[in-house]
């Protein structure tokens, strides 16, 4: 095989890969737009001294397919981490520390056409245990057992 033939073969896969790139999905575009709006709101709140986005979170919970589950998670988080402030983060309910960094969030199932709500923690959460620990959980329903587990995780995350 000549050097020219090899060069042509090497370039084909890269060109094909580049043609497959379609950009961001509609969900990703929506999330980015929501994030830009949130950053502007956060800056405005910071100027006014108000950090709480309770109304924004409640509006997002009302949009959920199962708003009762979202509201119950909100209650559990507020009760077990009163020092966190509710806010939206990429259009999802989230809870931030005093520095404004998101510690806890949840992503409604319908957000990305998933079969479960995702309840997760960012790196500011104090959940480090050993060299491996979970940072996200799938939730399809809440019984007292799950509520107790969530409450313990939330308390640990802010300890």
Image (cartoon, rainbow, N blue to C red):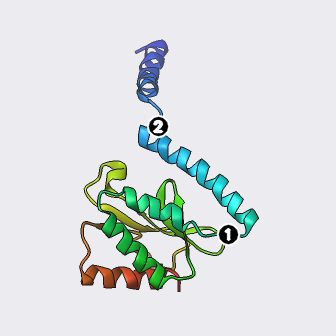
What residue would you read off at disc 2?
24
Dot 1 or dot 2, earlier in sequence: 2
> In the structure shown, which secondary structural element does the residue marked by tag 2 occupy?
loop
Above-or-below relation of 8 to 34? above
Query: Residue 18: which numbered mark, if any?
Result: none
Along the line of sight, the residue nearer the viewer: 14 or 74? 74
The image quadrant that residue 63 belongs to is bottom left
The image quadrant that residue 13 belongs to is top left
Q: Residue 111 at x, y = what percent? A: 37, 51
What residue would you read off at disc 1?
50
The image quadrant that residue 72 belongs to is bottom left
State how many labels appear: 2
Q: Residue 93 at x, y = what percent? A: 46, 63
Above-or-below relation of 59 to 12? below
Q: Residue 100 at x, y = what percent? A: 63, 68
Query: At 33% from the left edge and 64% from the top edge, which residue is drawn?
Result: 67
Residue 129 shows up from this direction:
no
Query: At 45% from the left edge and 16% from the top edge, which residue is drawn?
Result: 8
Q: Residue 145 at x, y = what percent? A: 25, 83
Query: At 44% from the left edge and 78% from the top edge, which residue is drawn?
Result: 77
Q: Are marks 1 and 2 in contact (CB under 8 Å)?
A: no
Q: Give the Cα separation between the discs numbered 1 and 2.
A: 33 Å
From the image, state whether disc 1 or disc 2 is nearer to you: 1
């Amino acid at each position: 095989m000549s050097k020219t033939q090899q060069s042509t073969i090497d370039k084909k896969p890269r060109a094909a890969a580049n043609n497959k790139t379609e950009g961001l999905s509609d969900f990703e575009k929506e999330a980015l737009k929501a994030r830009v709006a949130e950053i502007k709101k956060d800056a405005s709140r910071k100027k006014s001294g108000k950090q709480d986005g309770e109304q924004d979170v409640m509006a997002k919970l009302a949009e959920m397919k199962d708003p009762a589950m979202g509201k119950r998670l909100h209650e559990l988080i507020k009760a077990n981490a009163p020092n966190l402030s509710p806010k939206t983060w990429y259009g999802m309910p989230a809870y931030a520390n005093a520095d404004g960094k998101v510690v806890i969030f949840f992503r409604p199932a319908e957000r990305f056409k998933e079969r479960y709500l995702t309840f997760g923690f960012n790196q500011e959460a104090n959940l480090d245990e050993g060299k491996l620990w979970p940072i996200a959980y799938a939730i399809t329903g809440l019984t007292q057992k799950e509520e107790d587990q969530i409450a313990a995780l939330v308390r640990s995350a802010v300890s």
